[in-house]
Image: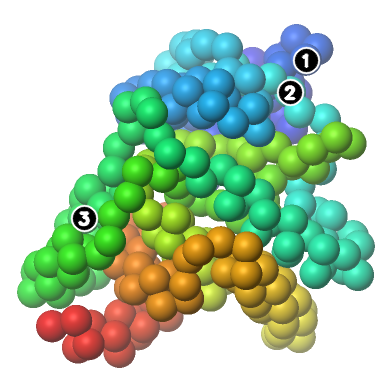
Amino acid sequence: MEHKILIGQGKTAEVFEWETDKILKLFRQGIPKKIIEYEYESSLNIYKKLNLTPKVYKVVEMENRYGIIYERINGITMMKTIASKPWTLKREAKKLAELHKCIQQEVDFKLSNYKIKLKNDISKTDLLSNDIKINLHKYIEKLDDGNVLCHGDFHPENIILTKNKQIVIDWMTATKSSPAADVARTSIIFKFGIVLEKTYIEEKIINFIRNMFYEEYLKHYISISEVKIEQIQQWELPVAAARLNESIPEKEKSNILKYINKRIGLIC
């Protein structure tokens, strides 16, 4: 890998240049192969359906790690656009809402159900009691389901803006369910996401801008879709609980736990 140039990285993978028009998403050690194969199959089917995602080529094994070769997209993330041009905040927020609605199409290929994923993730966390887990599982069963494509991690960092269109990346958590479920996931990310390694003032400014962006996104999404705010809010509790199983900052987990303890009595 010495000759490959690292161009990005996240919690689950590193991204390297690959040839002239491709990238290698090389997953970190410990990520099960079946999860990588799931992303590959999902990405392949989603690319054929939407044409709003990078083209996917193949799964490779390298230095005891697995990776996926993707088309290289030349552009910048929506997050970087907002950071460098804050006056475009409202425009980009509306663009995010329109893109979210655009990808929420009926699924006609094999894809996991979001309710099952939520219940699995909630079961795995050690931060909730068995009684709370049982009540959340029962609550999830009562929620309106659907057969619509859900990204599972839809936020500005996963949107690349090019000259001609927007590209949605990172479909590792793709499932099918209700449109409201996927918007709820985006809502929880915006509401509870923690900004690391910033001063108190910097954190306040970032949170203020982020909240403005989120409110504009949500308002516009509701105005262009048939989804009501109440439907989104119904999904937020189990979505937040499932996030406790992820590698997120302790402060974020603490805030989510406070939220769950405040809301759980309403569903019991």
Q: Residue at x 24, y 69 (%)?
A: 127
Where is residue 16 shown, x and y percent of the image? 68, 24
- Asked if marks 2 and 1 touch (Cβ < 8 Å), the reply is yes
Quadrant in which the C terminus appears? bottom left
Of residue 189 and residue 224, the one placed in the foreground of this image is: 224
Can residue 36 be seen?
Answer: no
Q: Which secondary structure, mark 1?
A: loop
**Residue 89 on image: x %, y %:** 81, 67
As measured in the structure, the alpha-carbon distance from the residue carrying label 2 to the one carrying label 1 is: 5 Å
Q: CA distance from mark 2 to mark 3?
A: 35 Å
Q: Residue at x 84, y 55 (%)?
A: 81
* Residue of label 2: 72
Q: Amino acid at mark 1?
A: Asp
Q: Residue at label 1?
A: 21
Quickly name the residue at label 3: 119
Query: In the rendered image, which quarter contains the N terminus?
Result: top right
Task: Residue 114: give x, y in percent of width and height.
Answer: 31, 49
**Sequence-first tag of 2 and 3:** 2
Task: Identify the colour scheme used.
Answer: rainbow
First in residue order: circle 2 vs circle 1? 1
Position of residue 197 measured from the top left corner of the image (x, y, whole percent)? 67, 69
Identify whether 80 is placed above or below 188.
above
Secondary structure of the residue carrying numbered label 3? helix
For image coordinates 80% across by 42% down, the residue present is 161
Of 3 and 54, the residue lying toward us: 54
